Amino acid sequence: MVNHQEKEKLISDASISIQGDANTPPVKYIPRDSKKEGFGTRILVAVGLKESSKKTEKDPNKEKEFHEKFKQLSALDKDAMLHRTQTPDTGLSQQEADRRIQEFGRNVIKTVKPTPWWKLLFNALSHPFNIVLTVIAVVSIATNDVPTFSVVMFMVLLSAGLRFYEERKSTKAFNHLKSLIKTTITVRRGGVDMKIDMEDVVPGELIPLKAGDVFPGDVRILESNSLYVSQSSLTGEFLPVEKSAFASETPTSIFDTPNICLMSTNIVSGSGLGVVFETGPTTYISSISEILTSTQTTNAFDVGVKKVAYLLMGFGLIMVPIVVTINGITTHDWYDSAMFGLSVAIGLTPEMLPMILNANLAKGASDMSRKKTIVKQLSSIQNMGAMDVLCSDKTGTLTEDDVKLTDYIGGDKKENEDVLKFGFLNSNFQRGLKNVLDVSIISVHEEKYGATTPNYKLIDEFPFDFTRRRVSVILQKEGEQSHFMVCKGAVEEVLSCCSSMACEGGRIQQLDRDSRKQLLNITDELNIDGLRVLCVASKQVNVNGDYAYDVKKDENELVFQGFLSFIDPPKADCADAIALLTKNNVQVKVLTGDNLAVAKKICRDVGIDVSRVISGPELEEVDEEDFNRIVEECTLFAKLTPIQKYNVVRALKRHKHTVGFLGDGINDALALREADIGISVDTATNIAKDASDIILLEKSLNVINQAITTGRTTHANTIKYIKMAASSNFGNVFSMLVASAWLPFIPMQPLQLLTQNLLYDFSQIAIPWDNVDEEFLRTPHPWSVKSLFRFMVFLGPISSIFDVTTFSYMWWYLGWNSAHHAKIFQTGWYVEGLITQVIIVHMIRTQKIPFLQRWGSWQLTLNTLWVGVAGVAIPYTPLGDFLGMQALPLWYYPGLAASFVGYFLFTQIVKKIYMTLFKEWL
């Protein structure tokens, strides 16, 4: 195992290096000013963590504040600590506890509250396009245009209702996951131990410590006996760490302070006594929660939708006044021109967008729920498809979260069953709580030799402690008088007790300086491979039956037996899942609080490039410019603090990436909230689940891949509608400009135009169920207003070309060229406009040739077919009379057919040119 000094000596005073493989030279970054505050843990003004010096004199870096405070408290002895917290030796009295709860408040961390139903409804109604449609509806009712008002408001309410229903359902499912169990804590009050609700704990509370307890606040250890604490929810380290009552001269981080334990961590083994010095909003964990509850972050989806809305509104503000002016001058009927202008505004607005968008998202949420995924925010589905960088933790995502013994080797690096045997005897007979390494040793031994009870008995034990970093058991074999000792622990600490080593053939060889160095080199090699290493040693003990063993006198002159190496193995399907992510053009970056060597090995095994990696202490020392460059280049970030994870995600977003973050610990919560798409699991901490957008019921990258496919399908079908509607409507408005300048009457009645738009919109209702080209699903597609604008301008005028062709056919060939022919002319343009709009659905939905190379889904094909038939049939029905239409003669249809075929062929040619120029279609 990498020793403490090696882990911390990661940087030199002169430069910072991004570590590379043996074949890749490290990339050097020279900080401009070594005295400059490190950017890695610099807390940013944007999230309210960095306060103005005018408001406070505290260090703006909250992590450093906690670090300094913990160092001061750590250095106090027991009496001084009790004096500081004003705690008697027997604990607080009930009266004092009641007074303090009034002074400090209840021991509650501020968390993200579920969004209330009224806010969900308001958010659904206040969608940018719903606002545009509502404005149009208000203008319509103000001009007594009841049909337009009714249709537009129906679309707004249907869209908002669908979104509200889906998000309300998701919120209920998420709340169902939350635990409602109250946590009780044992405290010592007036010399009596009693259980109280965790919320009633106050600063100065004296708490007895035992295995299984959760720390109810930030606690200073006063007494300890083999006390081991799991900090995995904060650090990502799966192995528990020892905590004691003694101070460390140089704690390197908040989590390394040996006599301070943080709220939400828990005791794995041992016992002791502690005093609570911070509760509720002043704890370390609360500083993380505070950021989550006090900041609002924007995601790529929300930004994209707003930009599209602004683009279309901008077109409307420019085009509508022009149409009204030209038409009014031409016809001299300004009222009808104004009404026609209102219809143009409706025609330019993709009024079905909110409903199509929400139907797409609702279908995506339904699909994902069948794939073990709960969607808290519907917009996260779209972001999942646009994601091009996935930041993930390591434990439980890339690995099984199940540590396994990989090798048991002697000093010659060959497999040695005696090493496994001695390791098993030590793990099996030690009386302390067996950690994951002990369980793994016992499991491998039982697999190899069966679950038999060894014919030994335990005589005595030297339990593990922080100073020795080893545990020894003294055993006696049945039928024998002599005893023997088996020692297991950290390599250097066990070697310090050894005077010889076992060799092949049962030989015993003295341990000299060279052989010790050789054994340490083997340890380094195993560490480089990402393995955690213990070693075992033994010796015969010839003593009388009543001998009193003493650790200082007897734990020496051992015979070194060999090494035990462990790894949390990669998930069996992880490499394939990462390969699929790479194929789908999603870059994976691992952000972990775990050891760099271990994380590097795991990443290499699952196919993640580790030619550029960096650790948290190194990252803290770089300036902002270098930080941004490092974030882009590195694929593995180890030993990160929660703030550093947050800063990495934030930097990636600044670089225009759509960022996903997968994590489940408290240390992941900040990054989860900041990411465009925060992904957690149902077994995650409550703070992590609060901060996430999607909850996985299975922590697997394969589930992520399925969600990406669903997201890209959702995005494809949404962008189809937007580009279809925007380009077609833009073309129609352009045609109206031409018609308004040409015709002595308005080119189409407002009610006819609204009916045409409604039928066209109905033809696209089945888009959420449409097929998507495989080529589209291979790459992420963020929202792009530039792409939409380009598509509108490029494709929109094509329909205008054939509109003008139809005008010419009707005006000159059919002779519909006076105000007397206005009714039949308007009917002819209505039918031609609807048919070309319906065919454009199939032209735009695929980059291939429709009907020949790619067909739409049967739902979409059937839907567009009946709409086309209904549109042509309406002029021959009573509804046509109501809409002011006239039955079209047969000789109109050859011109319509020519326009239809010409539009199909010309659009396909333009499609090829567009894809050649811009390397995209949708």
Image (spheres, helix red, strand yellow):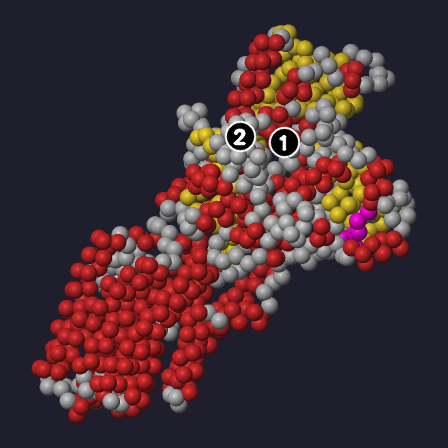
Residue at the far left in the pictured view: 813
Q: How many marks?
A: 2
* Residue 109 % position (x, y): 69, 54
Q: Residue at x 87, y 53 (%)?
A: 96
Q: Amino acid at mark 2?
A: Ala
Left or right: where 57 falls relative to 617:
right
Q: Secondary structure at mark 2?
A: helix
* In-front residue for pair 145/317: 317
The mark closer to the camera, 1 or 2, is 2
* In-front residue for pair 493/915: 915
Image: 73 above or below 352: above
Image: 596 above or below 694: above
Instruction: Name which quarter of the figure residue 360 lies in.
Output: bottom left
* In-front residue for pair 822/168: 822
Residue at the far front in the pictured view: 54
Magenta stretch encompasses residue 217: no
Q: Secondary structure at mark 1?
A: helix
Q: Residues within 10 Å of mark 2 (few under 14, many from 20)?
A: many
Q: Residue at x 84, y 38 (%)?
A: 80
How far apart in space, not on screen, are marks 1 and 2 (Cα)? 18 Å
Q: Which mark identifies residue 758? A: none
Task: Kindly check if marks 1 and 2 are in contact, taking CB atoms under 8 A apart as contact.
Answer: no
The residue identified by callout 2 is: 597
The residue identified by callout 1 is: 437
Part of the protein shown in magenta: 197-204
